[in-house]
Amino acid sequence: MTTKAATDQEFLEFLIKGLVDYPDDVEVSRSVDEMGVLLTLKVNPKDMGRIIGRQGSTARSIRALTRLVGLRHNARVNLKIVEPEGSTRGSASSSSVDQVVEDLKL
C-alpha cells in the first residue's frame, strides 16, 4: 500500500514510463518545502521529444495531471523536467535568442 505523500511521485513515474521508449531511464525525485511539492523528472535524451510534445503540449498535460493528483491530497505539486546531458534543444534556442537580441541592437 502506498502513502498519500508518495502518490503523486508514483503516478508521475507510471505515466511517464508508459510514454517513453526507455522506461528504465525514468527518474522521479520528490522534495517538499514551504512552496509545496516539487517533482523532478529525468528521462533518456532520446525520449525528451515524447515528454515535451509539439509546442510543449504533452508537458503541459503532464503538469496539469500532476497538479490534479496534488489537489486531491491538498498539496501544491509542480513538475520540473530536467534537460538531459547531450540534448541539443537548449543550444538551438539560446542561439536564436542571441540572434534576436543582436537584431534588436541594430
Image (cartoon, rainbow, N blue to C red):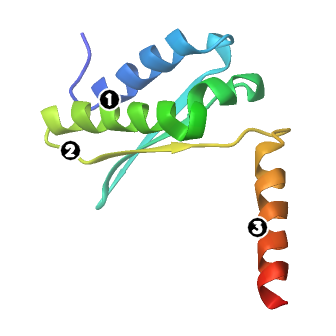
The label on residue 8 is 1
Mark 2 crowd level (few <14, some 14–19, many ≥20, 10 Å Cα): some
The residue drawn where x is 39% and y is 38% is 63
Give the mark toward the camera: 2 or 3. 3
In the image, taking residue 37 as reference, residue 52 lies left or right, namely right
Give the mark toward the camera: 1 or 3. 3
Mark 1 crowd level (few <14, some 14–19, many ≥20, 10 Å Cα): many
Quadrant of the image occupied by residue 20: top right
The label on residue 97 is 3
The residue drawn where x is 82% and y is 80% is 103
Residue 16 to residue 70: above or below: above
Q: Mark 1 and mark 2: span between their CA atoms?
A: 10 Å
| Dot 2 amino acid type | Ala
The label on residue 53 is none
Percent of width and height locating residue 34: 28, 61
| Dot 1 amino acid type | Asp
Number of dots carrying numbers? 3
Q: Are marks 1 and 2 in contact (CB under 8 Å)?
A: yes
Q: Mark 2 and mark 3: span between their CA atoms?
A: 36 Å
| Dot 3 amino acid type | Val
Residue 8 to residue 60: above or below: above
Q: Quadrant of the C terminus?
A: bottom right
